Image: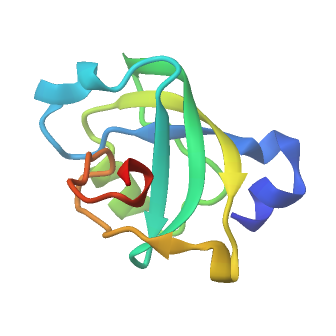
């Protein structure tokens, strides 16, 4: 988050679909806005700049902490590109329930009110 705030280079990220079934992967498309949570708080807003695609290898970057867990979590090798358009710090972070699914559509999300 700090890297994205301090450098335009770190605002474009590769996001994996994770371990979840890919049955709904087509629901996330180019130009969609998504919200990123951490510790049940909305920390960023991003735009999909490249729709999901299947890679031949597991993508990684300098922010990976546990490489074995990363490989297991990304085993299906489906990724999209995101551009972080907004970053929320401190009191600007709003409640956003963290889910096991990276991409979700919460019923009572703050952006739907």
**Which residue is more in the foreground, 34 or 101?**
34
In the rendered image, which quarter contains the N terminus? Answer: bottom right
Residue 107 screen position, x and y as percent: 20, 54
Residue positioned 24% across, 52% down in the render: 101
Q: Residue furthest bottom?
A: 91
**Which residue is more in the foreground, 74 or 2?**
2
Residue positioned 27% across, 40% down in the render: 75
The reply, left or right, for residue 61 in relation to residue 103 is right
Residue positioned 31% across, 44% down in the render: 103
**Which residue is more in the foreground, 93 or 54?**
93
The reply, left or right, for residue 9 in relation to residue 71 is right
Residue 76 screen position, x and y as percent: 25, 34
**Which residue is more in the foreground, 45 or 49?**
45
In the rendered image, which quarter contains the C terminus? Answer: bottom left
Quarter occupied by residue 69: bottom left
Q: Is residue 98 above or below residue 6?
A: below
Quarter occupied by residue 26: top left
Q: Is residue 102 above or below residue 32?
A: below
Quarter occupied by residue 51: top left
């Amino acid at each position: 988050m700090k890297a994205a705030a301090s450098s335009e280079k770190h605002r474009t990220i590769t996001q994996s679909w994770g371990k979840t079934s890919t049955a709904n992967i087509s629901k996330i498309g180019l130009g969609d806005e998504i919200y990123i949570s951490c510790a049940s708080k909305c920390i960023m807003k991003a735009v999909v700049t490249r729709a999901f695609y299947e890679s031949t290898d597991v993508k990684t970057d300098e922010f990976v902490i546990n490489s074995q867990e990363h490989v297991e979590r990304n085993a299906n090798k489906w990724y999209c590109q995101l551009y972080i358009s907004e970053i929320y710090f401190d009191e600007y972070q709003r409640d956003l329930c963290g889910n096991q699914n990276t991409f979700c559509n919460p019923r009572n999300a703050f952006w739907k009110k």
